[in-house]
Amino acid sequence: MLLKISITVFILCISLILHSFAKEGVEADLLVVAYEHHLLQYLENGENKGPTVEILNALLKEAQLHADVSFMPWARAFTQAKNTPNTLILSIVRTPEREANFYWLIKVSQLTLEFIALASKPENYVKTIEQAKKKSIAVVFNSIAHKDLLENGFSEKHNLYTVSSDEQMMNLFIHGRVDLIYADPLSIQHYFTTYNIEGVEVQHNKFIFNKQRYSYIAINKNTDSVIVKQLQQAADKIEKTAEYSRFFTK
């Protein structure tokens, strides 16, 4: 009888240990990579901030999952998310060439890109794409803005200056080392506010190369199916909440 009880207790202990390891494994293996975007997600005094971070936190809470966010240059974040299972990315524009690499969990913003010039340099104002092609333009490498410009006849050889971050792009722009940037005007204004940059005024014109697009929280297509299902179900619930409507950026 004692032997029977001992075996039963042993089996229960092993089951609890395996369950604990399985749960910890799911949480420990879930990664989040992010590109610092000063309207959507960014670091402020060592804390993750922005509406996309709030949506992510709600998503993970609803799915009963945990993950830390690692900020890095866009090209690195995209490559890691594309090639590493169980990896989420904040945030990424949904395009046909990216479609098969990710599960697209939830929208976080509506994308608007415009050519932006310093108001103090009216000679750099542009009203047509052909005028823009005669200017020097700073853009983050491999970003959707970069891809848009390449697809419409711009090139590094003639008019594009590619950089790895918004900070580098803005430094070139503010100091007059490039004529234009191709970016989201709201994000630029938020950048000025975040870094207490005063006395810099801009002028911009919108050119729509493609149909309206959205940024998403997405996850690598080879992610554990249990994690994907948890996140998809959580996203379905969150999209119906007032909290989500408040944080979705248009």
Image: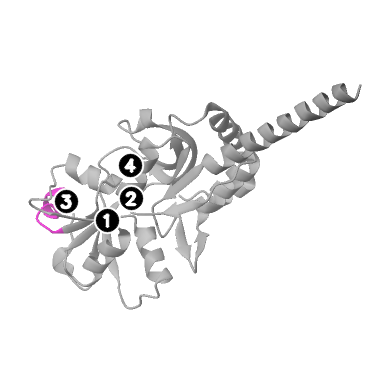
In this rendering, the label closer to the viewer, 3 or 1:
1
Real-space CA distance between mark 4 and mark 1, rounded to the nearest whole angstrom: 13 Å
Residue designated by label 1: 164
Q: Residue furthest bottom?
A: 199
Residue designated by label 3: 128
Tag 3 or tag 2, which sits nearer the N-term? 2
Q: Is 71 drawn above or below residue 97 in the view shown?
A: below
Check whether the beta carbons of the residues at disc 3 and disc 1 lie within 8 A of each other: no
Q: Is 165 drawn above or below residue 154 in the view shown?
A: below
Residue designated by label 2: 74
> Which of the labelled discs sits on residue 79, or is there none?
4
| Amino acid beneath label 1 | Ser
Tag 1 or tag 4, which sits nearer the N-term? 4
Local secondary structure at mark 3: loop
Check whether the beta carbons of the residues at disc 1 and disc 2 lie within 8 A of each other: yes
Q: Is residue 142 visible?
A: yes
Residue 135: in magenta span = yes
Real-space CA distance between mark 4 and mark 3, rounded to the nearest whole angstrom: 33 Å
Q: Is 158 drawn above or below residue 21 in the view shown?
A: below
Estimate the x, y position of residue 33 in percent, counting from the top left: 43, 48
Local secondary structure at mark 1: loop
Q: Residues within 10 Å of mark 2 (few under 14, many from 20)?
A: many
Q: Which residues are magenta?
A: 128-136
- Residue at point 86%, 21% (across, down): 4
In this rendering, the label closer to the viewer, 4 or 3:
4
Real-space CA distance between mark 3 and mark 1, rounded to the nearest whole angstrom: 27 Å
State the residue in front, 181 or 120. 181
Q: Residues within 10 Å of mark 1 (few under 14, many from 20)?
A: some
Real-space CA distance between mark 1 and mark 2, rounded to the nearest whole angstrom: 7 Å
| Count of marks placed on residues | 4
Q: Is residue 245 visible?
A: no
